[in-house]
Amino acid sequence: MLLLAVGAYVIAAARRPDGGRQVYGIALFVCIVLLGLALGHLLTGRAPATLTLPLGLPWLGAHFRLDALAAFFLIVVNLGGAVASLFALGYGQHERAPERVLPFFPAFLAGMNLVLLADNAFTFLFAWEFMSLSSWALVMAHHQEPANARAGYLYLVMACFGTLALLLAFGLLAGPDGGYDFAAIRAGTVSPGFAALVLALALLGAGSKAGLVPLHVWLPLAHPAAPSHVSALMSGVMTKVAVYGFIRIVFDLLGEPVLWWWGGLVLALGGITAVLGVLYALMQHDLKRLLAYHTVENIGIIFIGLGLALAFQANQMYASAALALTAALFHVFNHSLFKSLLFLGAGAVLTATGERDMERLGGLIHSMPWTALAFLIGSAAISALPPLNGFVSEWLTFQAILISPELPQWLLKFLVPAVGALLALSAALAAACFVKAFGITFLGRPRSPAVAQARETDRYSLVAMFVLASLCLLAGILPGLVVDGLAPVVGLLNGGARLIPQHHQPWLTLVPVVDVKSTYNGLLVLLFMALSGFAAAFLIHRLASAAVRRGPAWDCGFPDANPAFQYTAGSFAQPIRRVFGSVVFQARERVKMPPPGDLQPARLEVKLHDPIWERGYAPIAHAVVAISTRFNYLQYLTIRRYLSLVFGALVLLLLGMVLWR
Amino acid sequence: MALIADFLVQGCQMLLVLLLAPLLTGWVRMIKARLLRRRGPSVLQPYRDLLKLLRKEVVLADSASWLFRVAPYLIFAALWVAAALVPTFASGLLFSWTADLIAIVALLGTARFFLALAGLDIGTSFGGIGSSREMMIASLAEPAMLMMVFTLSLLAGTTELSSIARFILTADVGLRVSLGLALLALVMVAIAENARIPVDNPATHLELTMVHEAMVLEYSGRHLALIELSASLKLLLYLSLLGCIFAPWGMATAGAGLTAYLIGMTIYVAKLAFGGVLLALFETSIAKMRVFRVDQFLGAALMLGLLGTLLLFVSRSR
Amino acid sequence: MNDLGFLAVTALLAVPAAAALLLVLLSGYRLGARLNVGASLLSLLAAAILFGARPEANLYLRVDDFNLYLIVLNNLVSFTTSLFSASYIAHELETGRLTPTYLRFYHVMYQALIFAMNLALLANNIGLLWVAIELATLITVLMVGLYRTRAALEAAWKYFILGSLGIALALFGTILVYLAAQPTMGEGLPAMAWDRLLTRADAFEPALLNLAFVFLLLGYGTKAGLVPLHAWLPDAHAEGPTPISAILSGLLLNVALYAVLRFKMLMAANPAALAPGPLMVGLGLLSLLFAGLMLYRRGDIKRLFAYSSIEHMGIITFAFGMGGPLANFAGLLHMTMHSLTKSAIFFAVGHISQVKGTQRISTLRGLTVTHPVLGWGLVAGVIAIAGMPPFGVFMSEFLVVSSTFARQPLLALPLVLGLLLAFGTLLWRLNGMAFGKPDSGPTAPVQASTLPMMTHLALVFVAGVWLPGPLVAWFHHVAILLG
Amino acid sequence: MLHGLAFDVAHLLAGGMVIASFLLLYQDRLSALINVFALHSLVLVLAVAWQAFIQEAHHLYVTAGIALVFKVLIIPTALHRIIRRLGIHRTLEVVGGVGLNMLAGAALVALAILVMLPVTATADPLAREDLAFALAVVLLGLLLMVIRHNAVSLVIGFMSLENGLVLAAAGARGMPLAVEISIAFSVLIALIVIGIFLFRIRERFDSVDMQAMDAFREKRRR
């Protein structure tokens, strides 16, 4: 246990810019060690280990505690960290400004680990803010592009906002005389009104970090701005740390009393986030930004699960709550896997081609087949396709939704199916989006010369990606084991109630409630598919022809030599843009068709409006500017005016004194 | 021993769907031809086509990648497994619990995913048209389907097809508004998913109207054969889905013995034939709609599904 | 033992005074700078001795927990600043902005200022306190006007007028306190000795005390730069030599606030008098919000950080106004952290404006590329002052906000709003200066030691992670004293 | 008997200072203003001296002496020379009307008395009355500073304010450091006057030279 904290500090200490390999090597090693420890702790189900260092608040010290919840998230964090470091062993060679990345990468990892281990409010927020800060530094690594600088600024301000919200929440939990220790907070009770306030603040704080709509605006700007292995960490892992914060506060620290409408609130937010996230993603042509928006979507799915769990707990339906929680945590795990994988893939593409804009990519499957395979697996997983892992967690979420009619509250009765519809919609749209992402990027023909010369990435990167890909597959076909692994965490958060143990189900089938109700067996699905597929291939090649002739594409008899004739990302998204975008983004399309005989190309102009930015954030910014401009003239007063200010203050106070009595 | 028997039954169901699929397609084509006062090809024509295609060599576009060659097998496998998991003549078979209704829907999604990717692989304009439209349609069809699933599972308290079928058979469900809505939604989805009129036209090769055909435009030889076979499997799947959910009568239960199985099989075939006739009638009596009307069509399906679910609460709370 | 302490106290006063006199005679700026540093070091040592040995209070001077750490801080920062000013002033001489004569004057004034501030901190007699602060004001006025540019004169003049008014008000307040005390304490000096006053404060005339506090708050508040009495502060910071800006922000504001707090204790000791809390809370919030807004439109880097000083004075005043052990502790901590951090920032700013030859923010870009040490130093300083870990300000802001929200949720909201506002605006400026494509300005490396800056940042960092036990004990003790 | 007399005289003199302050408010010619200020200071001198006499506090005589030499003689003459040098002989405009200012002044005096009312008579009545008047003088001086544009009149306002302070200090029985304070203040005043003199601050010093000010008050950038 001591080694955990020590290890975290070792990472922090390892911020030496002498050669990336050492740093990443050390990071890799420490992450693996931590991973092993966390796994051991989770599986053996030992009692929570604690550690107190004489740091931080003097009369409190820095408490660290490792319980099941922390252990699970430690696994998520350090798995991602290890893989990212591994990837960076190769990827780091291409880094333009290593001195701006190396020092902060281990610090970032350390920050995330400390958040998970922290056991009092001060340490928690300290680590939380430290995490934001180091990731900010990483976002600013390529600060010479103005867009990145802006992204970093927005990111840090939103992070500060979130921290302040959490700070207020902890203030309420700790009470006026500052019982910041988590143990004290758990022991204490909060009045229902304050509890609701704490929930709202936790939503603001953790939500702004996790990218919950409408607090997501920074996310799609900041995540892509960082170097790709950092983007993988931020998107795949840091958002999970934020989810951890929410769970820790709402499920663990706040405890009872839970009101049913909390669940409804979180649920609705989750549903909206999921759909809006994927719609935003569909409108993007920047590969990494598309992925970042998908993080928003998946966060929405996770929060749907959490909201369901809250609703169930509020009605003492702990078995159902266990199902919902399992679904949410499972999705946390899954998303950390495939989102890291996808970002790493994007990073590989970026280094190979120097392009992030999908409109200039294409045909990479020929030049970098392995990356393409890994990315394909990731895409299939995030699109919730069986037999991969993304499907399992969404399936569990659906199962949890299907129990909802047993909820007594009418509002929830109606809300939950609606959210279910949103979830289904987002899943389907995600599939569409990743057909676009993979198809336009890797398939077809190269759209720019730089892409044509692309080479396959280095070994480290490939290994890193395939580790994740194989984990995606394993978690997909053996979900029962993961669910069992999650059981102690769920029990911890759910008053002991957990799902029935899965590992001795026949054929390792996943049986959330009872087998007549709903079952799923990824292993068999995979087996059947493999069998039938290979059988078909074998038979056909043996009995029928196996001959192949290469020729030009048929394409209904239109031989188009020019790759520009291919469908682009924009044109691929056009039908969906028409269907959804015109409502959500007021998407407007204008075709500029040159007059006949004119040789200049016809242009399609698409105008998209971001409703949340334009309605929510821009006004605030304008207000600040306006007010500060208004006040600014106070800088230019004459001394006499300043004197009269003092005079006025004096007279005012004296009057106040007279009236006070 | 019993286990082996179960294996046999399961296997025979897999083979059955595989064998029946082209027949169904042929049947629908024939009925359509007759309705149009044509003689039309024989019912067995699809089999002949498949065999012919299988024997032909494959002409691959230069820009085709390994994905393009793997996709047909993947699609075929996914659809076959899905079709085999839908109870056809008997419910509660050995592996029926492998995947519930949601999983089956997702399997269809897998097939679609790879089909769309294959459409994009060559890098032609038509492939792109097909894929993007297909995904747009799917993005609406899948939620509608899932809403239908919600309705059923809320009604039957399960997402296992066999259990649903059993529930519909045993419990006195009566005529339920939500069931009707669900049926409607499912039918609309089925039409859209199988690229039938009015959403798409399986027979057209007119560039701007085709969706499914545009994606598979570049396929030839055995690959095309697999694609065609998968398409008919899909049609079969939806019809048997309709059959097993809304008309489960005559379906044998597991281990009911050979005779029961045979009866079930004949009734199943009859159901398929009937469904095919209905489909042909519908298709001949309606005109194809613009691509951008499809979203309204499917949006209606989605709304119906949702409405069905909500109405269920109303009727349940009584 | 005790006489050792007494020796130290006398040294604290005598060393700067003697150094000042010596510097008057001494020409040659290099020698002057050295002497300046040496004298500051000596007085720092003397302050350090006070840790071990405290003299018992007499009618004029007194050392207790409260002023002890301020004295040490004071001499520490003035020492590091003298180090910084040595290299800074040399550059000024090269560029010809200052002549050796002015430099001599500067050094004399520097020591005199240290003397005045030490006196103010040590004073046990409220009259003496007032005299010392007036002296400090006059000296800083002269130093602000050192450059003799029109702008500098204007700033000095503004500072002079407003400062004198503040002094006058403070004096009136002091007289009122005496009048309140005189009936119970009898005539003469004891009625002005702070510690004696504190013991008997409950018997004083409450109405007079209230009146006195109003005047004192306004009078010393003017020195502490609380809105709306702040007007002199930004210009004085922007136009004076940077070491003086560092001293002003880092020390003089603290001293003024210290005076206010002394009288707050008196008020708190008298149950019948009005609670000083609300007044201070109000002024604090006003300063915080106002400064946060003003930060946004600044174009001069030193003026920017001057406004940030106002903001932090607001936070500190708010904290002490809230009272209670947590908030008071936070206030004391924040005082320390702010003076260390802000002076570090001004060190960085001084070097930057020297190597870049400008103070305009709009012309500073990509500093982390052109001058990594200075750039990152500035970044670290701003991050620290903005209240982010791993720096000490985070701890104090954590305590202030959380404890306030638990007690007065409605008060915490404007506080948080102001913090967020200040954070956003400050960071916006930083973003422009430290990052982005470097401008085509001079990129000559700074030829001065960045040691002082580093030392301060290191101290702040350590404090953010770990506070030494004795310091904590003091803070707790003083926090209880402050009620 | 003597005590009553003492009280009355002190009262009279303190009241006289308030009246003098009102005169200051009323004056709108610079030279006249300076003369009135000399009068103001003279009254202060008498008041302080009287306090010294009745308190047998001899150090107060020093204070009075300083005030006499400095404020009644040196400063006014210096100011006269300055305004002649700066060539300010025209009438100076007053913000608002004289009548308005008078009204404000009256209100301030009322405020001062109101504030002093709750002070129970435990403090000796002498100090108490004096205090009320001193406060009034302070406030009036502040008002004068606020309503006049001119540097010289600002200084005069400040000095009258300071006179109020000295009055209060003298009124406070046995207040130590009274002398030191008066000296310190004299230094302050001297510096201000020198400042005006050195910096050649003409009328409306608060707007020295617009360009110069814009240059460092960042009006340019926006």
Image (cartoon, rainbow, N blue to C red):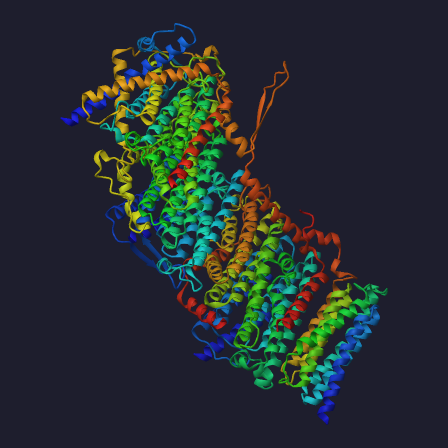
Residue A90 percent coordinates (x, y): 37, 35
Specify the quadrant of the image occupied by residue D109: bottom right
Residue farthest bottom in this picture: D1
Apparent side of residue B81 relative to residue A430 in the rendered image (left or right): left
In the image, B318 versus B200, the foreground residue is B318
Nearest to the observer: residue A534 or residue C143: A534
Q: Can the viewer see residue C63 in this picture?
A: yes
Determine the residue located farthest toward the top in the rendered image: B39
- Residue B145 or A451: which is nearer the viewer? B145
Q: Residue at the location (71% across, 61% down)?
A: A641
Residue furthest toward the left?
B1
Look at the picture and state if D134 lies above or below C444: below
Q: Position of residue B239 (x, y in %)?
A: 34, 21
Q: Nearer the viewer, residue D153 or B29?
A: B29
Image height of D119 relative to A589, above or below: below
Q: Residue at x 29, y 51 (%)?
A: A3
The total of numbered circles placed on residues is 0
Give the left or right position of residue B2, taking residue C349 as reference: left
Quadrant containing the N terminus of chain C in the rendered view: bottom left
Q: Is residue A349 visible?
A: no
Residue C131 in picture, x, y percent from top left: 62, 74
Residue C185 position, x and y percent, is 57, 85
Question: In the image, C161: left or right of B234?
Answer: right
Rendered image quadrant of residue B135? top left
Which residue ends up furthest to the right in the rendered image?
D90
